[in-house]
Image: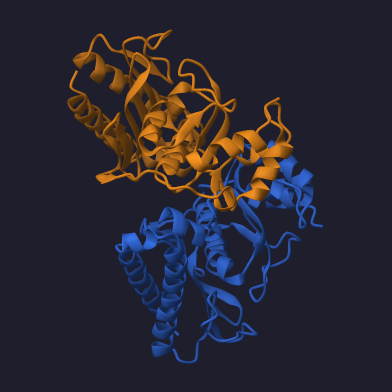
Chain colours: A blue, B orange
């Protein structure tokens, strides 16, 4: 398998899918109809996933595909070559904002990340990585993340997690918010991951994400030195939902140790 | 005073300032130097405000100018024609993200908003309004905001305000977060206001904003039916810092009445 050729294949497929989604927005009136909007989203989500599946199966019939919409196989192991796909991450942004939603894809072989992509569809911004070769923001190489003191960090956290909730001690989380420089919340996990790997945020924390939300991002993260784990500090499990943190390596340990207390 | 000519004047000035800021980013290495970055920001912020002041004074020497950087007059009243200017709203985004910062300008005559602008500098997206004539997103008219149930609303709130703080009852705020569909936080008041007037968010709440953060936005808001007040429900004071809410008219009253309790 020539990984650089596979990278070209994947990028071409992603750009084409993005173009199709942008074109679907030209039916503006349909999108604006509230009840119609949900159907349209579901349709575009499914059509895009199906588009990826058909493209991949046509060229690589032996590859497995795990997708959010569940139109691929019921993938039970990461053995062999596996694509993990989210055709539209940030569905509510898609419906309401017509921006800030991402296509994100990871390609793994025997569980090892080889190719990762996060594509901001409306902005046509691609964050991507090839294992061992580096990561790029469009055509510019992404640099290794530089250390940042926690007190100067800007972190992606949804306000929900600093309110009483079933999953995490929100008082500890509140301490974190009071310690750092600021928080952001964009409504798309893939977007927040893309911002961490490119140094626009210093960490992103979520209590519940699926493999397709993070698959592509974990591969890009590795190339720039960002650390991705669940909130116990364990490697991300790419076969089931779990907690998630991606962080600049200088603050990952301290966030987990001092501010995260799962219930 | 021909308000449409003044609108052309303002747009031209804003686009030119945006171009200058984008060009300043080409000195990439300088921006990336941490200590250098703060100076650069301060410089660009000041230079941009000075650029606006010079442009306005050259054509309209009798107009007053209130700007964030304090390079205009010490404006004590809104009598006569007054420009309220924030050359860069979202400074931390500017430094860290190189995106998500806005130029925002309001033009008032005897305290009545006549022209409002919010310009996403990197995306080159302009939200603007002319009193009584309507509001636009670039060349497309912005429509009147349609009612939204609070339970389906997506609201801009920084996580800080759902943690214990000196200004507002955070438990009430927490109830609000648990009631609505979702929250976002972008780190630029003007950006969040632009999102509300264009229906991408349904409200935005902040505990402390300055006149230059909201001046332009309040004028755009009026044209699409969005309501802007302080958190007591009073008209925004454009001469001093205050609390702030902009909301879809269907939820403004309910948010203030049921969920906001100032300390």
In this view of the protein, which residue sits in the foreground, B148 or A124?
B148
Question: In the figure, A123 relative to B15: above or below?
Answer: below
Q: Quadrant of residue A95?
A: bottom left
Quadrant assignment for the C terminus of chain A: bottom right
Residue at 36% across / 59% down in the picture? A124
Q: Is residue B179 left or right of residue A215?
A: right
List x then y, in percent, for residue B38.
48, 30
Question: In the figure, B238 relative to B216: above or below?
Answer: above
- For this orientation, the residue located farthest to the bottom is A62
Q: Quadrant of residue A215?
A: bottom right
> Is residue A24 in view?
yes
Residue at 60% across / 86% down in the picture? A74
Q: Quadrant of residue A47?
A: bottom left
Q: Is residue B200 left or right of residue B131?
A: right
Quadrant assignment for the N terminus of chain A: bottom left
Q: Is residue B72 left or right of residue B238?
A: left
List x then y, in percent, for residue B204.
52, 38
User: For the image shown, how many numbered marks are present on the structure?
Assistant: 0
Question: In the figure, B28 relative to B168: above or below?
Answer: below
Residue at 65% across / 43% down in the picture? B176
List x then y, in percent, for residue A251.
67, 48
In this view of the protein, which residue sits in the foreground, B231 or B122?
B231
> Is residue A179 in view?
no
List x then y, in percent, for residue B49.
35, 22
């Amino acid at each position: 398998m020539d990984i650089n050729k596979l990278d070209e294949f994947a990028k071409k497929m992603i750009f084409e899918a993005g173009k199709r989604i942008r074109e679907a927005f030209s039916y503006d009136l349909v999108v604006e109809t509230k009840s119609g909007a949900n159907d349209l989203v579901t349709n575009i989500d499914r059509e895009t996933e199906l588009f990826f599946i058909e493209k991949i199966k046509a060229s690589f019939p032996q590859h497995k595909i795990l997708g959010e919409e569940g139109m691929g196989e019921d993938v039970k192991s990461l053995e062999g070559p596996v694509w993990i796909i989210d055709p539209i991450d940030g569905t509510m942004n898609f419906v309401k904002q017509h921006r800030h939603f991402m296509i994100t894809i990871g390609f793994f072989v025997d569980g090892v990340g080889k190719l990762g992509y996060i594509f901001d569809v409306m902005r046509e911004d691609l964050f991507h990585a090839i294992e061992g070769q580096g990561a790029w923001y469009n055509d510019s190489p992404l640099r290794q993340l530089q250390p940042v003191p926690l007190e100067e960090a800007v972190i992606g956290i949804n306000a929900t997690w600093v309110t009483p909730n079933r999953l995490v001690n929100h008082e500890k989380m509140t301490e974190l918010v009071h310690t750092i420089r600021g928080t952001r919340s964009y409504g798309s996990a893939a977007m927040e991951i893309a911002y961490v790997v490119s140094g626009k945020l210093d960490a992103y924390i979520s209590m519940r994400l699926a493999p397709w939300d993070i698959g592509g991002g974990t591969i890009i993260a590795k190339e720039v030195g960002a650390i991705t784990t669940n909130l116990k500090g364990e490697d991300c499990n790419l076969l089931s939902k779990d907690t998630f943190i991606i962080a600049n390596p200088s603050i990952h340990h301290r966030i987990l140790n001092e501010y995260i207390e799962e219930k």
